[in-house]
Amino acid sequence: MILNDTNGKRFVNNDILQRKRKVHESAMKVPTSSIASTLFLLSFASSSLAVKSSDFKTCSQSGFCRRGRALAERAKVAGEAWHSPYSVEPSSLSISSTESSFTANIKSSLYPSINFGLDVRIQDDGVVRVRMDELDSLRKRYDEAARWALIAEPRISQNIKWTVGKKDVRAVYGDKKDIEVAIEFQPLRVVLRRSGKEQVVVNGRGLLHMEHFRTQESENPVVASEEGLDEQEVMQVKSTAWFEGESEDAYWEETFSSWTDSKPKGPESLSIDITFPNHGHVYGIPQHATSLSLPTTQGENAFFSEPYRLYNADVFEYIASSTMSLYGSIPVMHAQSAESTVGVFHLVGSEMWIDVAHPADKSTQTHWVSESGILDLFILPGPTPADVFAQYTRLTGTVPLPAEWALGYHQSRWNYVSSDDVRGVQKRFDEEDIPVDVFWLDIEYAEEHKYFIWDKKTFPDPVEMTNDVAATGRKMVVIIDPHLKRSDNYPVYQQAKELDVLVKTKDGQSEFEGWCWSGSSSWVDFFNPNSWDWWKSLFKTTESDKWSWTDSTDDIYIWHDMNEPAIFSGPEITMPKDSIHYGGWEHRDLHNINGMIMPNVTGQGLIARSDPPKRPFVLIRSFYAGSQRFGAMWTGDNLGTWEHMTVGIKMVLANSIAGMSFAGSDVGGFFGNPEPEMLVRWYHVGAFSPFFRAHAHLDTKRREPYLLDEPYKSIIKDILRLRYSMLPIWYTAFHESSITGLPVLRYVHASVAKSSPLTTKVALGHNMSFSLKIPQALPSMTSSTLEDPVYYDYFSHQAYRGTAKGKTITVPAALHQVPLLIRGGSILATRERPRRSSPLMKHDPFTLRIALDNQSGARGELYIDDGTTFAHEQGNYVWRAFLAEKGRKGKGLRITSRDLPAAVGNEFDPKNEYARSVKGVRVEKVVVLGLAGKPTNVTLEGGEELVWNFVPGTAATEKKEGTASVLTIKDPRLGIADDWAIVVKT
Ligand code: NOJ
């Protein structure tokens, strides 16, 4: 059984996705999302607090990174004289019968006896996959990363014709036949061109090096002396040293601090350079605390001196501006220019370091060095950001539609110490009428940190406690860490031991032991398929023949922390690289993948425990490419500082670029006691993050919103209520993201500012532009605002008009003012009744906010379903398209609501069970911003006059700023799931 298959059916139902994608594509006249229409701005005062860094390797302390950088340095010194020793043997070229792919042998002139195989395929959607491995080698390189990261074997195009020339093999393809891929023979180079212009060049700088397997004694021609060698041998030694360096550097063993990494397989690293000519910015490769447009690590005036490191790690008090590894790793990068976005996905699960340089203004060089694994590189041809998102998520999957409650507010701390504490916190929220959906329990709920096992001294009644929380529709999330206490009275550990599914030490026989919260612990090897059914069965709430979690309920969901894995007694606080996993693979080969299987299996356990099944919720700290299918993520142990607040937004955006859209940071900061002002700002950030959770360290003072003095308490309450009123927008955006792969949180090229020394702008929008940096400086409206020349303040209805060249505007953002703008041309659906939790809003009416563009038009959409089950996969949902356009003879306005799937001819039953269940749910208010003149009447089409009110604006003409006119149509008695039209005559 392949885990991804089982999982694929549940989480990424490709058929349904394909159908919905079609609906979406055909409905492109409707904006990609109504959330696209809001722009949220944050302004912070600057502050600087000291942060600690911990004992993690720098590149020069890591043997293979050192070797990789030294290779690049030698190439630099050699300049023009440098050439890659790797070349394609033209005679070995074998094109498949369908012409879609080809294989060829590759030789390195330095090691004539070593064979490498190249495999190039062009996929249906134009993505180029380049694979290279050593052939007939002493050992096998790890080649299973694709198995975990990809949702399925990518579909290969049937429309490719390779042309084999003397110097290269090439194919021209794409709808406009404007894309060309060329594999040049000598030296080996892979080039992607669009309209004749180079976009991506692989091995253009000759830094490709796949260290072949060797024995310690044998055949390494790198020797100190040339004595006794014949002329040819001397030549070879010289050239090898020229390329690989003069000594064996950390080939067979490596020490760091007090740790020795035995390297039984010897050197097997992989170095590859990827250049993006004509692309001046690169983004992605999370997770790092840095700017969205990745600063340089090489070249003159490099911003950082260290390469970006991808090696999942639990970094204590991480630095807010650094290339250091953090908890998750996704080796996907977007490169962008004003005209084009392309991407690469370097599918390797081992530790990786990436250098970035901009040798010329509008070009980017990158160099990727990984410790082991085959070359499995996807070139994503774009040419738009939306195309790159679609290309990447077709490979690794989209974020599945989450339960709606998961988009509400989550209240956490380390720790709510007893069931009465939980009840007390809930009571205070209710007394203050502050909405919250989820209460979280950190590790102290578990007896001796034996996860699943309640500490009955403090949590004597977990089921009753959860039921009390669930009485208002709320949920609980409980932590289950991956380390299992090695204890005779811990059934979970005992069962794992009996099943023989624990990670082994380097001898491959003994159980690996390390130290974590629970003291001496062992780790389940989730790469071992025998662990899956057993792990799933633990989540059963009913008795079974084995131990299961009978003192839990369907309202408890799961948080997997420390899944890098964090091991306090291990090198770099993680697992020794020579530990052994299922299949005999070393931990080094799959370290970055390690954290992604546990949440997958847990999710399946959560689904299996109830009938009908409910959507799972799992929060994860460590992640890899494809983890978006299995859980939400948060950015770990941030500090309560302005810098961390700011960089947290960038990290969420960078994760979103790499598919992990359901992301957020600890509101308030994990460490520290933020001042009330900072806490308020942090709630602003949280309310506009896809995942919205306040969390805090054990040693911090309690800071639940109700504890604050006025005015802070009321301000936070208002922010939370704003988030809840906008839940339909978030849910619709998640729905869109689950279909298209576009992130939920995005940034647009219009930017608006408040005068303040440190400003971070976040936009929720479809109008993505990667040219926008998020600077810690005064922003200005530098980019084009041609498409969307008007924005409206969400609250005051002030109209702001951009210009083609861009324009700086100032938006008030006092503590009580959320700087939130709606893009002209959009229609937003909200629910404005304050409730204690989101499930209580189920039958609440909607308000439609119509923000007209300069042509008096607007579009929007709304997606709703039962919010918890999988019934939507059987067509049980409501998906509406709203449209406002000029009325007859270009006068007045006609506002319509229609069924979006049916409107584009999709098979869909508008009277489905869910639609019937919301029959009585109505639109209670329609607000139109920016109508040119006062209406003479407002009617239902062909029907009665409605109750309305019009307040003229001060922005009388399209050219002027000032408040927009506001037409409010009161309680038009329209069903949210019904077709209707309103006619506004002016
Ligand atoms: C580390 C996590 O990052 C943090 O959120 C959690 O509170 C502690 N572990 C204790 O579980």
Image (tube, helix red, strand yellow):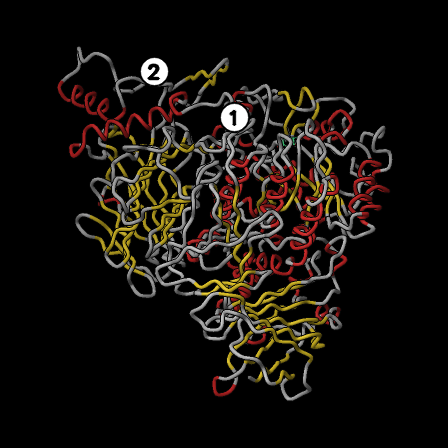
Residue in front for this viewpoint, 774 or 384: 774
Q: Give the mark nearest the N terminus, 1 or 2.
A: 1
Q: Which mark is residue 26?
A: none
The quadrant of the image that shows the N terminus is: top right
Disc 1 element: loop
Residue 728 at x, y percent in the picture: 64, 60
Amino acid at pointer 2: Glu
Whether ligand 1 has any atom under 8 Å from the Cβ at mark 2 is answered as: no
Residue 71 at x, y percent in the picture: 28, 28
Query: Which residue, given by chain and number where applicable, does mark 1 sit on?
Result: 50
Q: Tag 2: Cα neighbours inside 10 Å, few (<14), some, or many (≥20)?
A: few
Query: Which residue, given by chain and number where applicable, does mark 2 sit on?
Result: 217
Please tell me in which quadrant of the rendered image residue 744 appears. Answer: bottom right
Question: Looking at the image, in which quadrant does ligand 1 appear?
Answer: top right
Residue 533 at x, y percent in the picture: 68, 41
Side of 191 where 843 appears, left or right: right
Please tell me in which quadrant of the rendered image residue 784 appears. Answer: bottom left
Residue in front for this viewpoint, 560 or 763: 763
The quadrant of the image that shows the C terminus is: bottom right
Tag nearer the camera, 1 or 2 = 1
